[in-house]
Image: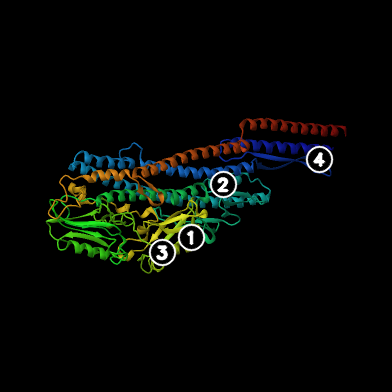
Amino acid sequence: MSINSILSSAMSGLAASQAGMQTVSTNIANVSTPGYARQKVSQSASVAGGNVNGVVVGEPARVADKFLENAVYQRAGNAGRTDAASTYLDRLQALLGAPDSASGLSARLTAISSSVSAIAGLQGSPEAVAMFTGTVSDTLDTLSGLQGDVANLQADVEGEVSDTVDRVNVLLRKIHDLNGEVSRLQGLGLTTSGPSDERMSALEELSGLVDVSVREQPDGRVTIDTGSGQVLLDKRLRQLSYPTGVSASQASYAPIDIRFADADGTMKASTGEKIDSTAVGGKLGGLIDMRDRALPNFSEQLGQLFSGLAETLNKVANEGTTLPPPQVLTGQANGLVGSDRLGFTGKATFAVLAKDGTLVAKTTVDFDALGAGATVDDAVAAINAGLAPTASASFTDGVLSIGAASSSYGVAVAQDTDAPSDRAGVGFSQFFGLNNLIRSNDSALAPSGFTADDPHGFGAGETVQVVLRDASGKVLASQTLSGDTGSTWGDLVADLNAGSLGDYGTFALDDRGRVAFTANAAGAGATVSIPSDSTDRYGTGLSFSALSGLTGAASGLRTAEVPAAILTDTTRLPLARLQLDAAVGQKAIGAGDIRGANAFVDALAATADFGKDGKATVSMFANRLLGSAGSQASLAKTAAADAAARLSDTVNRRDSYSGVNIDEELAQMVVLQNSYSASARVMTTASQMYDTLLNML
């Protein structure tokens, strides 16, 4: 080897040591920088003419394990999803209050039972009656307020969905720009460590917002797909398009559209792919699940709870009367018109009484005797025929009213003891809402009792959208029914079964006239919702949603109330019972008759029909609802803690491999300093050899 070769090798050794020390210095300087991957200088032997003549120093390269980085991305998505679910379920739990709270829903329902028991114990004292009616009113306020709070919570989720979409777009633009920088530097043979570190940090944050699959390309770029298969980034930038500023509770929300975009984020044509379910994963998936499934399901069951409570209390109230009896009993719309099939069996007694309870006139209408083709107008005519001239009934705009002809008289309705009137499981007075304790402008508060042959009564151009979602909240199918669809309820049900919804189950009218959905294997766990409804049956003000019972969201809770007349006048609570065997001129209502109080107690202890949610007592259904919410919140909190722990472990594993260890770097610094000294010594020796040769000449 020539002296020149020796000098060249020594100089390359010095350069290699200097490059290594510079890299070590950079590593030490960034020991606490988040997302920084330590760098390492690559070295190789320099060969010329078959001889090794030094060291070739390459650009510093990141020390990183792609498998560990991808593991972080995967676990970040799970952590983001579970954290979002835990946060909002915890907020829902806070809205429900502590189990022992006196103002909580469970306590309110318990207070109804205890306060109505006190009526019997205190012999119907005005104070006890006022306590009961006030407690029922407070419970309705609690239910309505809770439904409003859930709607506000859903609006908060929607606002965060919008914010998350905006952040995803920012990160996609950043990663797209860094892709270009990494590719350019790699093409020039320069180090890509800086932009690669930035890109990794951006990918880690993005993976917490949506589940992503990251693949590195030969040119240094990365492509990104969502966990559900949509492309987010390749050589072309994409952005998520979603309406901003909505932040409100809605029955349904627009899907997130994926669009091509310019480098500055300006959106172009749609890619044809959309994000509309929790399958996208990450925080966004968790938020969509809360918005489209968890919170609506809770709100719907809250509506079912109200329906069961209202039907239970109204049943007892409509079997009773007051002393003095009211001059007029006015019902509420239940969707029927005068020409509709009456559909009642059994008997009901209609009476006119003096203010002291003395019977003035009565008539018992045998609905079976009216015939199978009897209409509502036929029943009104029968009542009028039996009570004239002391009282009369009318059916106007879908509302039944029975009034005494004189202000000295009152009216009462009672069920027959042996053959009580019945349509869809409720009596005549309750079906028409004549003596309801709870009223609502949005619902009849009683099942419709429609059969397949009854006309649906919806006008041309009136539509209702029915949506089916799977257990994750993803839309499986959507169908729009029109008032032009056939003429009967059977036609509407047949249309539902013949459409896209029929692929996932079967629709049918149950024995109470409710439209029930039974899922098949493809639709297991699916739920039905009605995002929009413009129908109005024969102008009665009641829609398909209110009459079908397909979803508890249309339960009428929003406008539910105890009538002001009952709240302000304790004598207006129907606690008495009409003596059916009393003759004209005899007392048919006894003073101090409070048998209705015990009837309320018995009814609250009996099972109620909650439709698709089965049968249970009101308190049992409420406890099941509250218990389920608490259980979900607890499980979500545990899942979030577990996911965070797994993510932390994966990050630690990644950082232990690629992170900076100050002791290792200092040890490497010593090695490089010794290497530098050795190369310098070789140069000194070579220089001395030159001097010796020159002196010899």
Q: Where is 109 relative to 226, above or below?
A: above
Q: Which mark is residue 52?
A: 4
Residue extending furthest toward the right: 697
In the picture of the structure, the residue carrying the numbered disc 1 is 502
Q: Where is 663 relative to 138, above or below?
A: above
Which residue is more in the foreground, 232 or 182? 232
For label 3, the SS is helix
For the residues labelled 3 and 1, the Cα–Cα distance comes to 15 Å
Q: Residues within 10 Å of mark 1 (few under 14, many from 20)?
A: many
For the residues labelled 4 and 1, the Cα–Cα distance comes to 78 Å
Q: Which mark is residue 203?
A: 2
Which residue is more in the foreground, 337 or 190? 337
For label 4, the SS is strand
Q: Nearer the viewer, mark 2 or mark 4?
A: 2
In the picture of the structure, the residue carrying the numbered disc 3 is 490
Which residue is more in the foreground, 204 or 342? 342
